[in-house]
Image: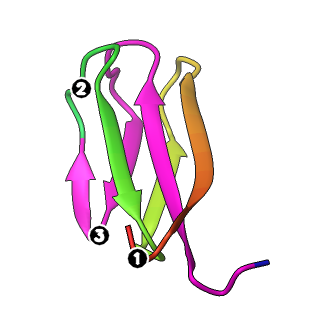
Amino acid sequence: PNDDRQKVRANIYLEDWKPGHYFELNKKAIMNYKAGCYAWWVGDIEHSAANIGKDYRYTLQLTGHRNANT
């Protein structure tokens, strides 16, 4: 693998936010989102997700790489 590559990630919300659904990116909570909204980041940014609600939480996470020089 090329050491110049950076991780690129996107978390896409497949449905509207519901109580108990939680996502945090770079120490900031993301809540009250609508279906189709997304969080996108490059590199090793701290992130976490939890579902402490009564309903299932559906998201799509994509992970890829890009050249650090672009």
- The residue positioned 34% from the left and 20% from the top of the image is 18
Residue 39 lies in the magenta-colored region:
no
Label 1 amino acid?
Asn
Alpha carbon separation for disc pair 3 and 1: 23 Å
Q: Quadrant of the N terminus?
A: bottom right
Q: In the figure, 65 relative to 12: above or below? A: below
Q: Which residue is mark 2?
A: 33
Q: What secondary structure is marked by label 2?
A: loop
Q: Determine whether label 3 and label 2 are within 8 Å by CB.
A: no
Foreground mark, 1 or 2? 1
The answer to which of 23 and 52 lies nearer the viewer is 23
Q: Residue furthest bottom?
A: 3
Q: In the figure, 20 relative to 57: above or below? A: below
Q: Position of residue 60 (x, y in %)?
A: 57, 29
Q: Which residue is mark 1?
A: 69
Local packing at callout 3 (Cα closer than 10 Å; few below 14, some 14-19, many 20+) is: few
Identify the mark at residue 26; answer none if there is no mark: 3
Q: Residue furthest front?
A: 69
Label 3 amino acid?
Asn
Label 2 amino acid?
Tyr
Magenta residues, as a range?
2-30
The answer to which of 4 and 57 lies nearer the viewer is 4
Alpha carbon separation for disc pair 3 and 2: 17 Å
Q: Mark 1 or 2 closer to N-term?
A: 2
Foreground mark, 3 or 1? 1
Q: In the figure, 36 relative to 29: above or below? A: above
Q: How many marks?
A: 3
Q: Position of residue 52 (x, y in %)?
A: 50, 39
Q: Position of residue 38 (x, y in %)?
A: 33, 33
Q: What secondary structure is marked by label 1?
A: loop
